[in-house]
Image (tube, rainbow, N blue to C red):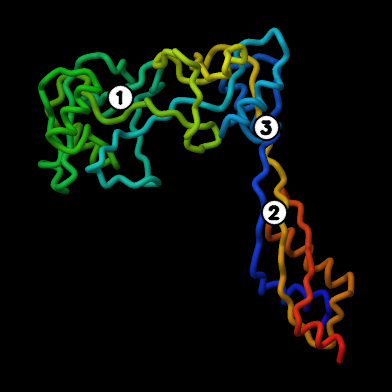
Amino acid sequence: MDRRMFGILLFSGLFHVAFPLHRPRYNFIKKSKTWLEARQHCREYHTDLAAVNDEQDLMDLGSLVDSGFSHVFIGLQRSWGWSVSDADNHKEGDPSYWNWARDEPEGAKHCAVIKFTGEWFASSCNTRRQFICYNESTTDLSERIVLNDDFMDWASAQAYCRERHTDLARVRNQLDNEALQGLPILFWTWIGLNAESWAWSDGREASFIPWRPQELLGVADCAALDVNSKPLGIVDKDCAEKLPFFCYTEPRKKYLVEVKLTADDSVDMTDQAVLDSILKTVETKLGATTDVQLRWKKLPEMEENSKQ
C-alpha cells in the first residue's frame, strides 16, 4: 500500500483536538452608512458588524477611533421574540412562525398586535388595547386561548396573563394563528410578541451590553458605541442614521493536534510524504480558517520497536 495513503487511513483514529480561543480582529470604517448598509459592507469584506463580548472588546474598539467621531455603529439590534414565562414549555431553537403584514414591523414600535385578518402589526407598547392570553396546560385550542376585553398596555396585559393563565398568546404555527384570527377581534389586539431584547448581527445572544449610564432606551432599534463616554458605553440609535461603524474578522484558529499512530515495519514514520498527507487531511477536516501544527510523540512501544 502507498505509504501516504496508509498514513491517511491511520489518521481516522484521531483522538484529540484542542485549540485556544482567539479574539476577533476589529476594523474601524470611517465612511458613514446606515446600519443595514454597514452590515452589508462588513459581511462582504470582513465577517460581520462588531460584537462586544467583554470589557476588553469594548476597550479594543474604543482605541481604534480617531478624534472627531462620537458614535460608531456596532452589530447590536433589537430582536423580536415571544414572551416566555416560567410556566411555558417553550424551548430555544423551536421553529419560528411569522405573519407580519407587508412592510412590518415598522419604526420604533416594539410590541405586536393581531388584526382580525390574522396579520401582525408593530405598535407602541404603551397603547391600551385588548389582549389574548393562552393556557399551556391544554392542547385544545378552544380552551387554550382567551380573549380579554379589558384594555391594558402590553406590559400590564403580560402581567395579567401570567397571573391568571400562562402568558400572552404565543403563535407557534399557522393553525395557532388561524385560531386567534377566529376570535371575535374588533380592534388591534395584543399578542406576546415584542422587541424588548437585543441580539448581535451574527445571531449570537447579547449577554454583555454595557449601556451608557442613564441611557434612556426604547426609541431606536440599533446600537452604537459612544466613544466619548467615560466609561465607554453603548447607546441606541436610529438604524437609518448614517454613522461610521466597526466590523470584525473571525480569527484563524490554531489547533494542536495529537495523533496516535500504529504502523508495521513497512511504514517509515519519518517519511515526509507520510507526514504531509496527514497534515493535508487534518487541514481539510478542520477548514480553511485554521493553522494546523502537528506534534509527534513516540509511545514507549514505538521506542521498543525502533530498537529491535
Q: Distance between the residues labelled 1 and 3?
A: 33 Å
Q: Which of marks 1 and 2 is in front?
A: 2
State the image coordinates of residue 62 (x, y, percent, origin top left): 66, 21
Q: Mark 1 points at which residue?
A: 112
Q: Foreground residue, 219 or 98?
A: 219
Q: Mark 2 points at which residue?
A: 287
State the image coordinates of residue 94 (x, y, percent, origin top left): 36, 46
Q: Name the residue under label 3.
A: 44
Question: In the image, which disc is placed on residue 144?
Answer: none
State the image coordinates of residue 135 (x, y, percent, origin top left): 16, 41
Q: Earlier in the sequence, mark 1 or mark 2?
A: 1
Q: Earlier in the sequence, mark 1 or mark 3?
A: 3
Q: Which of marks 3 and 2 is in front?
A: 2
Q: Quarter-wise, where is residue 136 in the image? A: top left
Residue 220 appears left or right of 3: left
Mark 1 packing: few (<14 Cα in 10 Å), some, or many (20+)? many
Residue at image point 67% right, 27% down: 60
Residue at image point 67% right, 73% down: 12
Q: Quadrant of the N terminus?
A: bottom right
Q: Foreground residue, 40 or 9?
A: 9
